[in-house]
Image (spheres, helix red, strand yellow):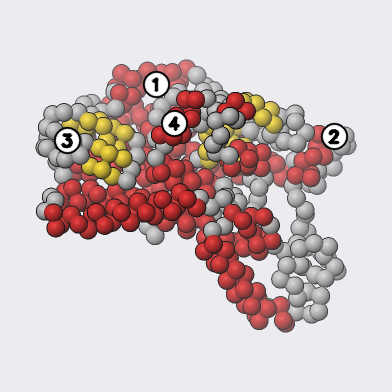
Amino acid sequence: MAGQSDPHLSLFSAAEVEFLAEDEMVEIVPNMKMDALNFICGDYGPFYPQLTTEVPLWLAVALKKRGKCTVRLPQWMSVEKLTQVLEAERDSPREFQPLPFHYVEISRLMFDHARDDIPDMYMVRSLIEDIRNVRFHKVETGLETISARTHAVKLKNLSAMEVNIVRPFVVRTLQAFYKHDSPQMIQHPDGTANRQPQVADRGPRRDLRRR
Amino acid sequence: MELGSEEGLGISSEDYDSLIATTDVELLKRAWRNEKASPEILQFQTSLVQRSREQIQLMEDTVEEFPKNCTDPLTVSLYQMDLDRMLFVLRSYLRTRLQKIEKYFIHISKSDLWNRLSDQEQKFAKKCTDYMEKHLQRSVLSHLPYGYQSILRQSISSEEDDMVPEPRLDTFVFCKSKGSVGAFQLDDSGDEIVDLVADDLYVLRYKSIKSLVESGQIDLV
């Protein structure tokens, strides 16, 4: 099926992450009259010309494509807000600024389908790109600090698309350290007590027996 | 969810309200995400899938009726989109589970994971096991010397079933806490403690948060 991700490479495909983002709510201003829509995912409308209403992004995009509405730019996507975020992002090397969990996908969909509704389109676009780059740089430097003692990595405010992109690296790094830290791999001169339970954790070894 | 156990589970009345307000669509999406992100198979959401199926059926009937009522084509296509989205999540959820079953059917049928499967999934797993056993017997195992003919063990001298693929529970997963979970231990020795507050995002070993995923206190992302 289209969009179904290969479970071995990454858990979610980019299309699937975008699918989830399409359920985020945005404000639209319709230019036509339409009865309320009673969907499985909720009730939206009724729609009246010039009256702002909230709908999921996929519905906004569908209406926008047919020229039935304009999409209101979400507040966090204004040049002013994004400039603040970018500055804060640069000033705090260890933290991520709070942005919508799907900010990458939402902005992508807005750029693709509602560009005429975004004032300062190029400014907004380059700001989002800068923010992404700064954040990825932080993730990369963060990866360098992972060591054998790492049991947990905190990534508060990391967004869905960012999670999906860094997932293979982070998981493989942690697993590699975890594996090589295993007492089965190295002889610890001080076979400390707190290492023992980890061994039990790891389940039975499955070595090929030699004859 | 019992109201009496609120405090023990760290669920405030606010969370409880949002739990009630959550639609089946949200629940199904959550089940889908968790299923995709967890290494082992999770409990089958029997009643949720049942309800979703009924809603889909109802909506399909409604959409079919539309042309007769002269509903405008735009509205029809929007309803169809909503329906397609729901169908996609449901199908992908079931498919993800089937993939896991195909991979770990022996392990699943030997452990208490078996009870997490739906009736149809159990049938599927049984057939998988049958066919795979027959196939391996015929093509490989019957040609091997005595002592090496088991599908489960490397040789007759193995003390346990050591050739059964199992999901790696010590793998790392990304998870997000819904409400405040509070401090909990990461490993058995108890020297690693993580304090999960609302909306935190962590990369943790699946094993250590397994029970929190099962009780629905944190989501995998």
Asked if labels 1 and 2 touch by Cβ distance under 8 angstroms, the answer is no
* Residue at mark 3 to residue at mark 4: CA–CA distance: 27 Å
Q: Where residue B202 sits in the image (x, y, percent)? A: 57, 33
C-alpha distance separating marks 2 and 1? 46 Å
Residue B102 vs A50, above or below: the answer is below
The type of residue carrying mark 3 is Phe
**What x and y, as percent, mark residue A108?**
32, 38
Q: Are marks 3 and 1 in contact (CB under 8 Å)?
A: no
Badge 2 or badge 1: first in the primary sequence? 1
Other-residue count near label 4 (Cα within 10 Å), few / some / many at <14 / 14–19 / ≥20: few
Tag 1 secondary structure: helix
| Precedes in sequence: disc 3 or disc 1 | 3
Q: Mark 2 touching mark 4, by CB under 8 A? A: no
Seen at 79% across and 80% down, the residue is B145
- Name the amino acid, label 2: Ala
Instruction: Find the distance from the CA under tag 2 to the CA under tag 4.
Output: 44 Å
Q: Nearer the viewer, mark 3 or mark 2?
A: 3
Q: Mark 3 falls on what kind of element?
A: loop
- Residue at the disc numbered 2: A193
**Foreground of the two, A114 or A201:** A201
Query: Measuring 31% from the left and 34% from the top, which residue is drawn there?
Result: A25
Q: Which mark is residue A85?
A: 1
Q: Where is mark 4, residue-wise?
A: B18
Amino acid type assigned to the residue bearing label 4 in the image = Ser
Residue A92 can be seen in this image:
yes
The numbered mark at residue A47 is 3
